[in-house]
Amino acid sequence: MDYVEIKGGQPLRGTVQVSGSKNATLPILAACLLTSKTSVIRGYPHLRDVDTMIRILRALGVSVRVSYQRIEVTPGKSRKFVAPYGLVSTMRASICVLGPLLARQHKAQVSLPGGCVIGPRPIDLHLKGLKALGAQIRIEHGYVVAEAKVLKGSDIYLGGHFGSSVLATGNVIMASVFAKGRTLIEDAATEPEVVDLAEFLNKMGARVQGAGTHVIQVDGVDRLHGADHTVIPDRIEAGTFIVGAAVTGGDVTIKNCRLGHLNAAVDKLQQAGVDFVRSDGALRVRAPRRLKPVDVTTLPYPGFPTDMQAQMMALMSVTPGISVITEKVYPDRFMHVSELNRMGSHIFLEGSSAIVNGVKSLSGAQVMASDLRASAALVLAGLVAEGKTLVSRVYHLDRGYETLEQKLVQLGAQVRRIKK
């Protein structure tokens, strides 16, 4: 098991390049299954989750050629429809092959997914949407088995208990591109990753309208062709570096960053005193002399992203005053609280809220990452802590951050990976 060792106390300064979005790349790779022709995906992040999706595609008989700058996907005439447990169980996003397999092969058998342990994340909205299109679905031996001789357009409501679902919206869009007639998806997720998927599908010849709003219209077509597409930048990676600059008292210029994808997070950080300067597609982030506490509530996009909650908590841990962070997307997503408290934070849980009483300083400690964003929060806390911090289970980092340690070192941090 690898560890990340951080020696705190160095402000982040310099320029960093944000990688492509993981959460956009994964469903776009799955969408390549909708045609026999070749598609090219550029600007993708070099991550463990992307590697897993490539392995799933290959297990489905797809030809995948990978270079540093692009992924070339050619499904050809493969008729395989089983996405195996050994791969799907490691990554929740792999469920997004269900829709395109059903649309093109008329049958899909996909293992129930795994991923980060951040609380219940059922796939009921995925199955509800596919059933509305006419699919017959059953659960057998840990697999979702979906079949449909013909899919038909339908009006589908995808609102869930905690709001809309990005993956479910993507799955239903992909399943409906060949459906007879028109599909209307109401209470669809509006995240930029959904918009990016729709743009890729439209390049392939699909007819998807309204992506980025809560009502998406899909008019069925007979076939799709290949497409050449560059994925959007990763907004959560950009947000993590913004917090890194703020928490260390730094001055960082972030390239390949779309500020419009992070409006809610930037608004809260501005309330905390962080200064932002836009210039030529880059964003300069300057920490204030004194941070101010802010209350945060996570919500579906365009609200404050749940994937930034842990990082924001690390920042508020060293901000004088009391902050309240409420989790409305995944109410159980607080496993990082106990680890931050090991480093000297004063955080108390009350239901789905965390009350953060800012302290003057944190102290380095041995801590354990519970999920992808929690691991980033612990690294951020280590950057500002006194002494040495050792973060274990950093394979979570490899799932969502491309070469994070190298990028931090480039900004002046004292970070290294220890191989065990």
Image (spheres, rainbow, N blue to C red):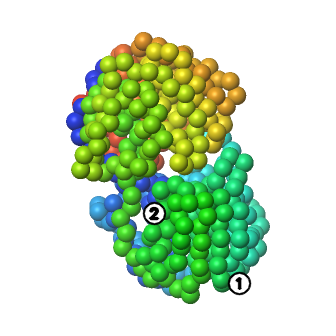
Residue type at mark 2?
Answer: Asp
**Residue type at numbered disc 1:** Lys
Picture coordinates of residue 28, whole percent (x, y): 47, 66
- Label 1 residue SS: loop
In the image: residue 320, left or right of residue 96: left
According to the picture, the residue beneath numbered tag 2 turns out to be: 196
Q: Is residue 276 or residue 398 the one in the foreground?
A: 276
Can residue 183 be seen? yes
Horizontally, residue 147 falls left or right of residue 194, namely right
Mark 1: give few (<14), some (14-19) or many (20+) Cα within 10 Å.
few
Picture quarter containing residue 119? top right
**Where 15 falls versus 126 (above or below)?**
above
Q: Is residue 373 left or right of residue 383?
A: right
Q: Which residue is mark 1?
A: 149
**Of residues 321 and 277, which is closer to you in this image?**
277
Q: State the separation of the CA atoms marked 1 and 2.
A: 29 Å
* SS type, badge 2: helix
**Image quarter of residue 184:** bottom right
**Residue placed most toward the observer, 78 or 35:** 35
